[in-house]
Image (spheres, rainbow, N blue to C red):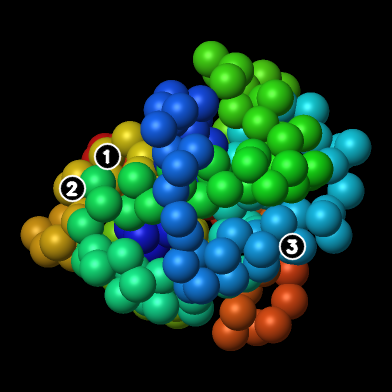
Amino acid sequence: MKKIFAICVLCITFVQLSLAQASRVIGPAEKKITDSICNALSKRDISKITNKQEAVALYTSCVMEHADLLQELADELKVDVNDQAAMQKVGMNIAFNLMKDKCANFIKLSTYFAEQKATEVLNNYSTGVLKRIDNKGFNYIVITEKGAEKSFLWLRQFAGSEKFTSGLGTNVGKHVKVEWQEIEVYLPLAKGYYKVKEITGITLM
């Protein structure tokens, strides 16, 4: 999950890339994932995007489609996929590649990445008791609410996420407020696009 987040941080920071990167020679794995992401973006309806949040969510889902290529890329670049700083740099390089290759839909999305804040995005919330973290390719935090289990996708850093980086620990059984937004992502295990609740914040009550 963290490596996906690190890759997608580029949506906000890629504009800071130096011109020196224009001379970078990319390897076959980096070329493969760049082309794969651009191809995934080309199949999406960008006309429906109206703000930064939606643009980042769409880009993230395209990266998630090809998460299986990240290890190959990390090996080529000799970086650890668990090193968030290194993977952020990898993500920025991919963004630069997409711009240099004139990936049309990425260029269109990039106009939203520079927004200071997203508008017209509705954040919902649920309350309940922390139960566990499920790993289904990505981490899901599970709570019980009125006797029913509810799962929330931990896709990227959110307010309060530092409390759970080593697991739920002593927080199991505590009452929490989970803030979330609904996004559509490609789930490799299910081989399809599904709407999921992405965590935007967790507060202990």
Percent position (x, y) of residue 86? Answer: 26, 52
- Return the x and y of residue 58 as percentages of the image width and height: 68, 48
Identity of the residue drawn at 57% across and 48% down: 97
Cα distance between the residues tagged 2 and 1: 6 Å
Q: Nearer the viewer, residue 196 or 65?
A: 65
Measured as percent of width and height from the top left, residue 102 is found at 73, 42
Disc 2 and disc 1 in contact, CB within 8 angstroms: yes
Q: Earlier in the sequence, mark 1 or mark 3?
A: 3
**Callout 2: few (<14), some (14-19), or many (20+) C-alpha neighbours within 10 Å?**
some
Residue tagged 2: 163
Mark number for residue 160?
Answer: 1
Q: CA distance from mark 1 to mark 3?
A: 32 Å
Nearest to viewer (mark 1 / mark 3): 3
Q: Is residue 198 visible?
A: yes
Quadrant containing the C terminus is top left
Per the image, label 3 sits on a secondary structure element best described as helix
For the residue marked with disc 3, what is the amino acid? Answer: Ala
Of residues 115 and 133, the one nearer the viewer is: 115
Q: Amino acid at mark 1?
A: Gly
